[in-house]
């Protein structure tokens, strides 16, 4: 949107406002408020915009009016004007703010000022002092190890050449079970706390359903006992090809709790794609549904699993207790699967070495066979730590992100919520209509994750008009290139809460560049490397462009990233991520596989 088409704020008249379809009397009142703000803060400052969002703009005013004031305020500002500015007092009660309030001087010395001013220094500290940073964050998340790690990072395990193992060894010697940590009672939650909220599409007139931690534990333990009754070897791969609903979350946690490996398969895949992933992962069983219900449509799923020549299938009916088709010989209904065991006592979690696999996910496979990327027992804590720091997810938060366990944001949502004492919000249906918008309102979602194409649909159909999203504290966005106007519109639906852009990858287990509630946030832009990540922009000569020098080039990462992949099941990990990359200070840089819209980043 060209800002030169907009008037500066001190040139806007009440007639300009009325011309946008706003009644004359209201237009005069809005103009009076605008004039007062401009007189106090100037016509073109971030403080001006901040006061406009607080005292003038609301979701019921035409979006064209929002645009008039945003572009008028920042008409001559330059690139990336701040759409949201952190409040100093609110910053102090964020996860990172509270930590820096108590330990900022210990971490950063006399240079520490306050959480907002010192955030960038703290990010650099997280890179240069991984031992202190990760020990601190794991403790903040109440992480429990059955055997504690000998240290946080061993850069040269067993005397190996650093180039043969560029990522080092994280949490050596530790034994842990991420699912057990998700189900633990600790300072963040009690057994009576609600940990999942959900609604089925078409049930908008009914109250939001909920599950307490006590109820979730019982469900997960039952499924874990039933899994053991199948007689599979520990460490066997078990696939999930289902919508992301309460059952799939319970199954996911049970597989991990019982010491098996989840194989993530998106419910949108055709039989050939399902078959490829089952073959690569050597899955011994698969959980699926007979159908996927979307509005009036019933989309076959179990039949695709059969066509993929899947192993033993445990099949859940999409509705009720009966199936729309006969099960294949040897396959088991969900109810028969559960009736094999009746255990009420706690299931003893299988604690495994931190380097053991817990989940096999896949790249998109758009350029060939998908890369099979194992998550270790450390990776869930990387996902949760990103959420703790960058999205500020904490106790009493309610986190929604339309996704699927077949993509990394599905497991990310589980761990980001439960490991931080928050509640998962699941809508079993399409996120593109008013039913989802009402669910966000009724569930009182506090952190809403999106992909830009969903926002584009919301804006073009206006399907969220009239719903109260004031409970939202922030948005998260990933997966696609964002659009400034669409995200200005999105912020306006929730009284101008910030959008935290989040770019990473399955092989990272989370993000490497993102935003923070302790920094000003611009639309469709990043504000910081993720905690523990160091980024380089490589120039044409292969050398990093100096920090704070403008330039364009290839993005590379330092190899030392907590939770990142160190192996692939069907390719040579070093050849894929490190071969041919330049070294720096004895460390070979890690390359990235990103969509085209992320391949070039500007260094400000």
Image (tube, grey):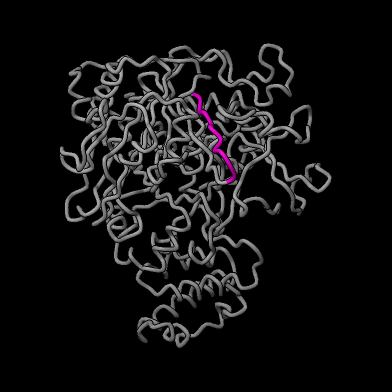
129 vs 429: above or below = above
What is the span of residues highlighted in magenta in the rendered image? 367-376
| Image: 108 above or below 44 | above
Nearest the viewer among 100 and 428 is: 428
Residue 595 pos. (x, y %): 59, 50
User: The N terminus appears in which quarter of the rendering?
Assistant: bottom right
> Residue sitting at 59 percent across and 25 percent down?
132
Residue 325 falls within the magenta-colored stretch: no
The x and y percentages for residue 507 are 56, 35
Q: Residue furthest right?
A: 541
The percent position of residue 319, horizontal first and vertical second, equals: 19, 43
The reply, left or right, for residue 429 in relation to residue 565 is left
Residue at x 61%, y 20% (from the top left corner):
169
Q: In which quarter of the image is the C terminus?
A: bottom right
Snapshot quadrant of residue 351: top left
Taking the image as shown, residue 477 lies to the left or right of residue 254, namely: right
Answer whether residue 200 is visible to the viewer in this image. Answer: yes
> In percent of the image, x 58 and y 16: which residue is there?
151
Image: 349 above or below 498: above
Residue at x 51% of width, y 67% of height: 485
333 vs 205, nearest the viewer = 333
Relative to 575, residue 301 above or below: below
Residue 264 percent coordinates (x, y) = 43, 34
């Amino acid at each position: 949107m060209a800002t030169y088409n907009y008037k500066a704020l001190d040139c806007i008249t009440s007639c300009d406002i009325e011309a946008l379809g706003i009644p004359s009397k209201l237009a005069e009142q809005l103009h009076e408020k605008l004039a007062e703000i401009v007189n106090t803060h100037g016509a073109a400052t971030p403080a001006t915009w901040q006061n406009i969002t607080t005292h003038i703009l609301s979701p019921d005013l035409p979006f064209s009016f929002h645009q008039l004031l945003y572009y008028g305020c920042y008409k001559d500002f330059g690139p990336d004007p701040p759409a949201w500015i952190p409040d100093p007092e609110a910053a102090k009660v964020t996860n990172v703010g509270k930590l820096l309030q108590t330990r900022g001087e210990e971490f950063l010395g006399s240079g520490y000022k306050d959480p907002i001013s010192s955030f960038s220094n703290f990010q650099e500290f997280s890179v240069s002092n991984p031992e202190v940073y990760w020990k601190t964050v794991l403790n903040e998340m109440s992480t429990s190890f059955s055997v504690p790690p000998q240290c946080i990072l061993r850069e040269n395990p067993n005397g190996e050449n650093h180039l043969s193992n560029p990522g080092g060894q994280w949490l050596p010697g530790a034994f842990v079970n991420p699912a057990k940590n998700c189900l633990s009672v600790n300072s963040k939650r009690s057994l009576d706390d609600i940990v999942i909220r959900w609604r089925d599409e078409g049930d908008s007139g009914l109250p939001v359903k909920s599950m307490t931690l006590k109820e979730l534990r019982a469900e997960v333990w039952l499924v874990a006992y039933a899994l053991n009754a199948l007689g599979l070897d520990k460490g066997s791969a078990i696939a999930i090809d289902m919508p992301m609903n309460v059952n799939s979350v319970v199954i996911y946690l049970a597989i991990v709790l019982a010491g098996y490996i989840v194989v993530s398969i998106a419910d949108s895949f055709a039989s050939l794609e399902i078959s490829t992933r089952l073959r690569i992962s050597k899955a011994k069983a698969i959980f699926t549904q007979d159908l996927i219900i979307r509005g009036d449509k019933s989309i076959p799923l179990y039949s695709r699993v059969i066509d993929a020549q899947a192993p033993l299938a445990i099949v859940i009916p999409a509705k009720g207790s009966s199936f729309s088709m006969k099960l294949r010989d040897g396959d088991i209904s969900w109810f028969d699967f559960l009736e094999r065991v009746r255990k009420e006592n706690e299931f003893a979690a299988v604690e495994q070495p931190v380097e053991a696999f817990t989940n096999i996910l896949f790249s998109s496979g758009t350029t060939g066979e998908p890369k099979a990327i194992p998550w270790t027992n450390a990776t869930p804590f990387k996902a949760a730590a990103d959420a703790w720091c960058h999205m500020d997810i904490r106790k009493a938060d309610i986190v929604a992100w339309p996704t699927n366990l077949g993509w990394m944001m599905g497991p990310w949502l589980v761990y980001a919520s439960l490991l931080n004492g928050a509640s998962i919000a699941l809508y079993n249906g399409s996120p593109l209509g008013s039913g989802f918008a009402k669910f966000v309102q009724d569930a009182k979602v506090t952190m809403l994750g999106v992909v830009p194409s969903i926002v584009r649909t919301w804006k073009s159909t206006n399907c969220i008009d009239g719903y109260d999203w004031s409970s939202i504290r922030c948005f998260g966005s990933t997966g696609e290139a964002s659009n400034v106007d669409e995200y200005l519109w999105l912020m306006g639906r929730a009284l101008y809460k910030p959008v935290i852009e989040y770019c990473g990858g399955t092989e990272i287990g989370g993000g490497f560049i993102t935003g923070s509630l302790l920094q000003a946030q611009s639309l469709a832009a990043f504000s910081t490397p993720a905690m523990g990540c160091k980024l380089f922009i490589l120039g044409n000569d292969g050398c990093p462009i100096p920090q704070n020098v403008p330039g364009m080039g290839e993005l590379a990462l330092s190899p030392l990233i907590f939770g990142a992949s160190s192996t692939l099941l069907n390719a040579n990990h070093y050849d894929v991520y490190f071969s041919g990359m330049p070294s720096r200070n004895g460390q070979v840089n890690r390359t990235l596989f990103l969509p085209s819209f992320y391949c070039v980043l500007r260094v400000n």
